[in-house]
Image (spheres, coloured by chain):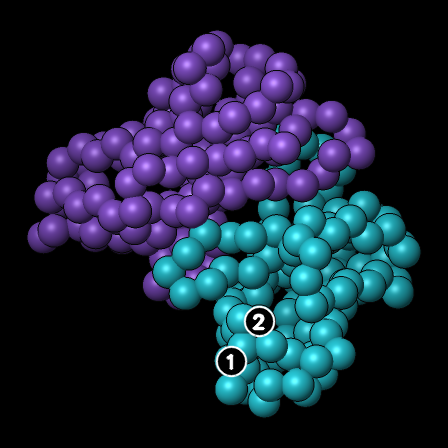
Amino acid sequence: AQTVTQSQPEMSVQEAETVTLSCTYDTSESDYYLFWYKQPPSRQMILVIRQEAYKQQNATENRFSVNFQKAAKSFSLKISDSQLGDAAMYFCAYRSGGFGNEKLTFGTGTRLTIIP
Amino acid sequence: SQTIHQWPATLVQPVGSPLSLECTVEGTSNPNLYWYRQAAGRGLQLLFYSVGIGQISSEVPQNLSASRPQDRQFILSSKKLLLSDSGFYLCAWSVHTPLEKLFFGSGTQLSVL
């Protein structure tokens, strides 16, 4: 079974600085997808960014980018120019690429605090 | 557009009482449906998912069950709640494409006393 590990329960960063959240995963599959979700205090889950494992190029969405290291099974999230609205729980997630295996497995999350 | 409805938002139940949480999706057909639980300060634990009517996959053997009586309806149930069933329950749906994101409901905060 696939597992997702987020080793940093809490992180903090000064406003306008850059922070990197770590995520590693364990799988024997070659076709899969990785996601970062954000859960602000409202508890609404929001997709931040996603990456296909077959793509070598790292995904980027505005201030958010990933460092995808397939061989190391690492999928870290970098947030540039941190803003107060970035304060939230961040979850890394894994989904198999095969049809019929539809589940999304989440890590335990990293709580990010933004220091004004 | 697609929407997901989950209710109730908050629920306080005594130990040993039954549970029924309902989730419905509008604006799409044949979605994948999911129930997740989030314990206080913890990650999301997948409880059940369904790829079609009557098809339920259970991830964690426990006190809960799920049913999908209609294409866009997903129900989480328990005959007798335990204290350990307390948590934040999230329903979600997705299309049958691995890259596509999950759309989450607003959640139910369940407190078992």
Q: Is residue A103 left or right of residue B31?
A: left
Q: Is residue B19 visible?
A: yes
**Residue indicated by mark 2:** B85
Badge 1 sits on which subunit? B
Q: Along the line of sight, which residue is nearer the eye, A93 or B104?
A: A93
Q: Is residue A103 left or right of residue B104?
A: right
Q: Residue at x 84, y 61 (%)?
A: B68
Q: Position of residue B30 (x, y in %)?
A: 83, 48
Image quarter in which the N terminus of chain A is found:
top right
Q: Position of residue A74 (x, y in %)?
A: 41, 22
Residue A80 position within the rendered picture, expressed as x and y whole percent measured from the top left: 23, 32
Chain given the colour cyan = B
Q: Where A64 falls versus B13 (above or below)? A: above
Q: Position of residue B70 (x, y in %)?
A: 88, 63
Question: How many badges with numbers are in the image?
Answer: 2
The answer to whether B91 is drawn above or below residue A14 in the figure is: below
Q: Amino acid at mark 2?
A: Asp
- Along the viewing direction, whichever of A15 and B42 lies nearer the viewer: B42
Which chain letter goes with mark 2? Answer: B
SS type, badge 1:
strand
Query: What shade has chain A been given?
Result: purple
Say which residue appears at 61% left-offset and 19% top-offset. Answer: A28
Pointer 2 or 1: first along the chain:
2
Q: Which residue is mark 1?
A: B111
Mark 1 surroundings within 10 Å by alpha-carbon count, few (fewer than 14), some (14 through 19), many (20 or more): some
Secondary structure beneath disc 2? helix
